[in-house]
């Protein structure tokens, strides 16, 4: 029956859906993808071959990748599971192999670094991971040692098989933290009893037998070996203590007493309050580490020291050394350094201090974004500016118009000349690099500026056409747990006023917020100083009101329910006073389940006008979705089969509130949907999906709400769509007011099975809303599916009738299929997609899409195909020749007819 | 044997409780007798309203809502007329475009005891006072509950809902509330309709099975077209000299 079901679905889809896919020659023409790795935790230069140009990185996003040192591009990349399961604990590299410990010591993996293939993977014994190192003997490295809380194990590097596993002695009291091998057939486990003593256990490489065990040395100052100790030279454990300001040295082989060397005796001084750091280098695991080591004494003070026959010699004193300590050096002649700065930028520097490339890894964690129209060119602006100026008489206006037309003509001729000139050159030589100077809006407004806000607090301006970063700005006062909200206060449409964006940065812990006002085209901070916000902010809203400089008014509501406006000029305050009684806003306190509505008073205080309380014992508010303010709905209703009209309920103030039950038992759990009017607090509709559980993804647009949930009863993902209609008559067709819509709308709902879980969901958006809507669904597999909204229509009939056929309704089928042509990103997988942003373009048929997650992918979609654009291969020759032929044919036939008439007249 | 006694006590006390609290509630309502007559399982909560010229809420009792829990909860309302004073005030509030607010306390319908029913806080809603006046006090109040029977919201609209600025001359029009009341529990959202769909499929396939014309295989039905196509292809192939071969040699 299932097969038949699928077959019928297929047939339906074949019949009704429009085919849309990318042609081969369109690949990469309108879309681009950028891949990122995230904040680097471990890095290794591949140094076993001199000419190698690889650097291996393991990141906090659980990504293991190889970067090209010449260009900074990825050779290959492996994206593991998110969360602690895929956490990379250690990265060791030897020759062609890279060994990773993953998931708090759960897995040991070996990768082939040239092509990024997996050599082997084994599951380790349980236990919390401490440290790992490569073990070599007689110049060959054959083993890897893994130290856990209670055990130490040795594995073959070739196949991962375990050679031996031993329990650590006295592991209840001793905290084993490091493992070391110097190539002499012994493996040392270094442990510490905090504030008491050090414990060292030496194992034989061959059979894991304990050769030596030393528990001695009163070291009350030591609590963390990895932070303050390091093995240098022929197995000398060297520790640094900030309290006594001295170095402690212990020869692991001789097991002598620990010697204390005060730093003062070496003529060194530590910056007060700084924990000194020791860094040593062990180029080959089969040999002891180098006798040279680095000591960091202050934030900007490093020393290169050498241990020479038990004496410490200062080799070099680096005062401001910005190179981070975990990064690797190599080569005796040259050096190459990879630096990660706190804005998550990776910079690769080669010997003469040349920056080879930079990677903006902050973009792997985009939080929010907006697309802003590019400014007009100078000539366009000239023409536009004409309308803004005060009229000074008919004659001068005509002259002005003529002059600006002349300028336009001039520009057009120059453009033609350039086209002609470029056409003669081979195509490869024609370069049109986008720089911040030559940015201008294109004919159809398809190229825009993407303003992206990342979790690290770095802002980017990216050209949507090419994906090149045009500006970046690092905000260095970001709180540790921030929430961002990006708002466009002034678009580019108000020349000569520059466009203006405002970023609200809120500390989630304290609720305190700051504003960053900037120009989205150039990234420059605005000279307008934002108001100080001493109180925690509860809500922010952009009003359609504008001040005299065309900046939209931003209202901020603080925890005293007082409202402040930005900008807060006299003009704005006056407008607010006039409008106050029609400015409403809502607040949601999910911890108490309280939804409340407020109205603005003329003195900018507020009054509570409605309250809805959802008991938190039963359910919690998961998300609240309003409609997008820039959404246009073209048609007020739907024409039915019998030519009557079913009017849509288009309430711009409608909120979709998603509730999830606190009881997670599969029989009793539920997902609730509340549709509430944000002005009056009226509950328009209340539905509950029983035996269902989150995560719930919601899209709310026009007169419909689509949500996706997990059905615990049937163990599958399901989609549900709610549509609201006013009925056959419109209550008030001219204007919608929440205060005057007494009749509740008709509610239709239908559900479908979806064969995949989803990561995120968004609806397409176009300029005028004529184009049919699609849902863009980000799948965990990395695909972005463009699902026509037509399939999610509660009016899909169970039984096909003449009327439903007339209306073009698809017969109901319980399963929504994923068709491969619907993937808008063909093979360009977007890893861990977290959000999809849609923006309208100047063409009604075209919607710009940006999907972001670990990667960023930008493309265009045409939900109703390109009905307003001629195809690329449109036959201009044919149409013009037909036209010409027709023209001549009419001319000739006219002439002939005339001759004939004349002849007839003579007759 | 120890169990029944406390249980009985609990029952008796809860019954007493309900009776007592009903009395307390009744004092809120104006028409005491009406509330008393309600069924035993129902309980009453005050419906309060507020309309002030300065828009600072001062809630006063408008009537008593009698809620009946159960599988299908029901509600009824007893309310008194507006006094002379209130009528003029309502008109004054309407003149300055003030709000007419209502509120009900948060209650849990399914609880057995009165103490468990009442919860802290109120649910409020509003309508423009002018709409209230112009509709001659015809309002529609609906109470919304959640899945488990907690009252989560109240809404009020007037019929008609618009404020057109028409004067209400007759004082009598503003005396009696003409209230339509309802209580709404959440609608169960439908799941995917697989059963019906499969049934329909079965029927269709059965219909097909009965019709022998449809049973023919693809080849049996269209053999002449395929044959025609094949002949056409052969003819066109033999007519054209092999392309490309000549070019390769030159």
Image (spheres, helix red, strand yellow):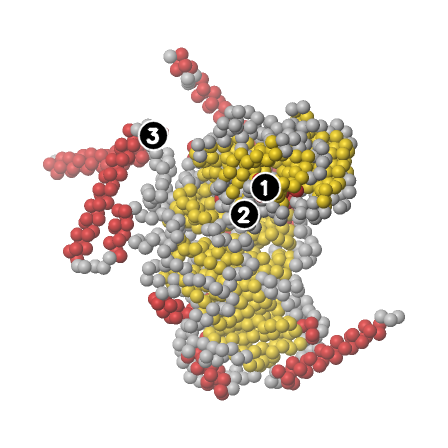
Q: Chain of mark 1?
A: A
Would residue A361 be seen by someone viewing this image from the given angle? no
Which residue is pictured at 44% across the width and 57% down the height?
A: A515
Q: Describe residue A258's horizontal placement relative to residue A521 as left or right.
A: right
Mark 1, other Cα within 10 Å: few <14 / some 14–19 / many ≥20: few
Image location (x, y in percent) of residue A144: 68, 32
Which residue is pictured at 36% across the width and 61% down the height?
A: A546
Image location (x, y in percent) of residue A390: 23, 59
Mark 3, other Cα within 10 Å: few <14 / some 14–19 / many ≥20: few
Q: Describe residue A500's horizontal placement relative to residue A810 as left or right.
A: left
| C-alpha gap between disc 2 and disc 3 | 56 Å
Q: Chain of mark 3?
A: A
Q: Which badge, 1 or 2, is on the more N-terminal residue?
A: 1
Image location (x, y in percent) of residue B239: 42, 18
Residue A429 numbered tag: 3
Which residue matches tag 2? A271
Residue situated in front as seen by the camera: B86 or A448: A448
Residue lying furthest top in this view?
Answer: B249
Image location (x, y in percent) of residue A773: 47, 49
Residue lying furthest front in this view?
Answer: A265
Q: Is residue A109 above or below residue A736?
A: above
């Amino acid at each position: 029956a299932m097969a038949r079901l699928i077959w019928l679905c297929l047939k339906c889809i074949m019949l009704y859906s429009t085919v849309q896919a990318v042609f081969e020659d369109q690949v990469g023409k309108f879309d681009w993808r950028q891949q990122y790795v995230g904040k680097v935790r471990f890095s290794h230069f591949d140094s076993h071959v001199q000419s190698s140009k690889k650097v291996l990185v393991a990141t906090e996003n659980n990504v293991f990748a190889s970067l090209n040192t010449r260009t900074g591009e990825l050779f290959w990349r492996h994206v593991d599971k998110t969360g602690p399961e895929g956490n990379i604990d250690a990265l060791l590299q030897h020759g062609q192999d890279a060994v990773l410990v993953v998931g708090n010591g759960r897995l040991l993996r070996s990768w082939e670094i040239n092509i990024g293939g997996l050599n082997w993977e084994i599951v380790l014994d349980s236990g919390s991971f401490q440290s790992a190192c490569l073990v070599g003997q007689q110049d060959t490295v054959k083993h890897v040692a893994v130290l856990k809380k209670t055990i130490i194990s040795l594995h073959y590097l070739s196949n991962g098989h375990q050679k031996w596993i031993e329990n650590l002695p006295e592991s209840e009291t001793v905290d084993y933290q490091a493992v070391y091998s110097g190539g002499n057939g012994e493996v040392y486990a270094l442990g510490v009893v905090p504030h008491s003593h050090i414990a060292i256990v030496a194992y034989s490489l061959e059979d894991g037998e304990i050769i030596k065990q030393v528990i001695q040395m009163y070291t009350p100052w030591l609590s963390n070996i990895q932070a303050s100790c390091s093995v240098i030279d022929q197995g000398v454990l060297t520790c640094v203590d900030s309290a006594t300001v001295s170095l402690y040295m212990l020869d692991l082989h001789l097991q002598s007493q620990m010697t204390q060397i005060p730093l003062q005796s070496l003529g060194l001084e530590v910056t007060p309050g700084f924990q000194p750091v020791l860094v040593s280098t062990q180029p080959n695991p089969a040999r002891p580490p180098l006798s040279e080591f680095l000591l960091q004494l202050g934030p900007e003070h490093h020393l290169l020291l050498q241990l020479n026959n038990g004496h410490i010699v200062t080799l070099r004193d680096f005062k401001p050394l910005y190179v981070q300590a975990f990064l690797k050096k190599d080569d005796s002649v040259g050096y190459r350094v990879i630096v990660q700065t706190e804005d998550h930028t990776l910079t690769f520097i080669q010997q003469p201090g040349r920056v080879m490339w930079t990677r903006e890894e902050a973009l792997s964690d985009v939080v929010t974004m907006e697309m802003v129209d590019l400014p007009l060119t100078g000539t366009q602006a000239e023409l536009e500016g004409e309308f803004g100026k005060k009229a000074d008489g008919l004659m001068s206006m005509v002259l002005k118009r003529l002059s600006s037309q002349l300028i336009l003509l001039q520009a057009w001729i120059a453009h033609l000349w350039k086209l002609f000139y470029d056409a003669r050159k081979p195509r490869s030589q024609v370069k049109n690099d986008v720089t911040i100077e030559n940015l201008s809006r294109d004919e159809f407004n398809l190229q825009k500026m993407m303003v992206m806000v990342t979790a690290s607090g770095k802002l980017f301006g990216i050209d949507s056409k090419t994906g090149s970063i045009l500006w970046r700005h690092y905000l260095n006062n970001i709180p540790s747990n921030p929430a961002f909200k990006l708002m466009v206060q002034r678009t580019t449409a108000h020349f000569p006023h520059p466009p203006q964006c405002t970023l609200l940065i809120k500390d989630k812990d304290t609720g305190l917020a700051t504003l960053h006002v900037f120009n989205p085209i150039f990234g420059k901070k605005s000279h307008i100083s934002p108001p100080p916000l001493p109180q925690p902010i509860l809500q922010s809203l952009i009003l359609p009101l504008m001040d005299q400089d065309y900046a939209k008014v931003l209202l901020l509501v603080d925890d005293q329910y007082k409202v402040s406006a930005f900008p807060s000029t006299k003009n704005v305050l006056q407008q607010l006073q006039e409008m106050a009684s029609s400015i409403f806003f809502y607040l949601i306190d999910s911890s108490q389940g309280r939804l409340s509505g407020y109205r603005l008073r003329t003195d900018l205080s507020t009054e509570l006008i409605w309250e809805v309380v959802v008991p938190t014992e039963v359910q919690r508010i998961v998300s609240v979705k309003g409609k997008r303010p820039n959404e246009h709905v073209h048609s007020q209703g739907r024409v039915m089969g019998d030519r009557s009209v079913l009017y849509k309920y288009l309430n711009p103030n409608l909120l979709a509130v998603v509730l999830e039950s606190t009881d997670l038992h599969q029989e009793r759990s539920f997902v609730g949907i509340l549709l509430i009017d944000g002005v009056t607090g009226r509950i328009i509709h209340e539905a509950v999906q029983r035996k269902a559980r989150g995560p719930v993804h919601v899209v709310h647009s026009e007169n419909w709400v689509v949500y996706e949930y997990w059905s615990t009863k049937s163990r599958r993902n399901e989609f549900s769509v709610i549509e609201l209609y006013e009925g056959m008559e419109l209550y008030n067709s001219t204007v919608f007011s929440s205060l005057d819509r007494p009749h509740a709308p008709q509610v239709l709902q239908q559900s479908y099975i979806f064969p995949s879980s989803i990561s995120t969901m968004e609806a397409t958006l176009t300029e005028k809303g004529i184009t049919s809507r699609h849902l863009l669904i980000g799948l965990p597999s990395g695909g972005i599916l463009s699902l026509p909204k037509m399939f999610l229509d509660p009016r899909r009939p169970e039984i096909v009738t003449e009327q439903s056929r007339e209306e073009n309704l698809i017969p109901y089928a319980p399963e929504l299929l994923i068709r491969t042509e619907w993937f808008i990103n063909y093979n360009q997988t977007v890893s861990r997609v977290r959000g999809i942003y849609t923006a309208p373009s100047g063409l009604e048929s075209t919607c710009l899409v940006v999907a972001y997650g670990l990667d960023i992918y930008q493309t265009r979609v045409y939900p109703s195909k390109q009905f307003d654009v001629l195809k690329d291969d449109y036959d201009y020759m044919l149409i013009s020749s037909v036209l010409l032929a027709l023209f001549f044919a009419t001319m000739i036939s006219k002439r002939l007819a005339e001759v004939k008439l004349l002849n007839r007249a003579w007759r | 044997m120890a169990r029944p006694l406390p249980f009985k006590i609990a029952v008796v006390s809860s019954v007493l409780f309900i009776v007592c609290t009903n009395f307390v509630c009744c004092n809120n309502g104006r028409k005491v007798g009406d509330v008393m007559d309600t069924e035993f399982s129902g309980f009453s909560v005050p419906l309060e309203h507020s309309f002030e010229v300065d828009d600072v809420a001062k809630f006063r009792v408008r009537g008593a809502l009698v809620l009946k829990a159960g599988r299908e909860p029901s509600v009824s309302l007893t309310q008194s007329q507006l006094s002379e004073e209130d009528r003029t005030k309502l008109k004054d509030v309407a003149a300055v475009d003030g709000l007419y607010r209502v509120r009900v306390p948060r209650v849990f319908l399914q609880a057995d005891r009165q103490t468990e029913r009442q919860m802290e806080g109120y649910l409020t809603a509003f309508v423009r006072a002018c709409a209230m006046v112009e509709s001659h006090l015809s309002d529609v109040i609906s109470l919304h509950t959640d899945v488990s029977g907690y009252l989560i919201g109240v809404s009020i609209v007037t019929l008609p809902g618009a404020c057109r600025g028409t004067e209400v001359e007759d004082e009598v029009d503003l005396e009696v509330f003409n209230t339509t009341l309802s209580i709404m529990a959440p609608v169960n959202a439908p799941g995917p309709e697989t059963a019906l769909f499969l049934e329909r499929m079965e029927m269709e396939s059965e219909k097909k099975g009965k019709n022998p014309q449809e049973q023919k295989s693809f080849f049996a039905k269209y053999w002449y077209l395929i044959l025609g196509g094949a002949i056409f292809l052969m003819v066109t192939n033999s007519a054209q000299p092999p392309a490309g071969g000549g070019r390769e040699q030159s």
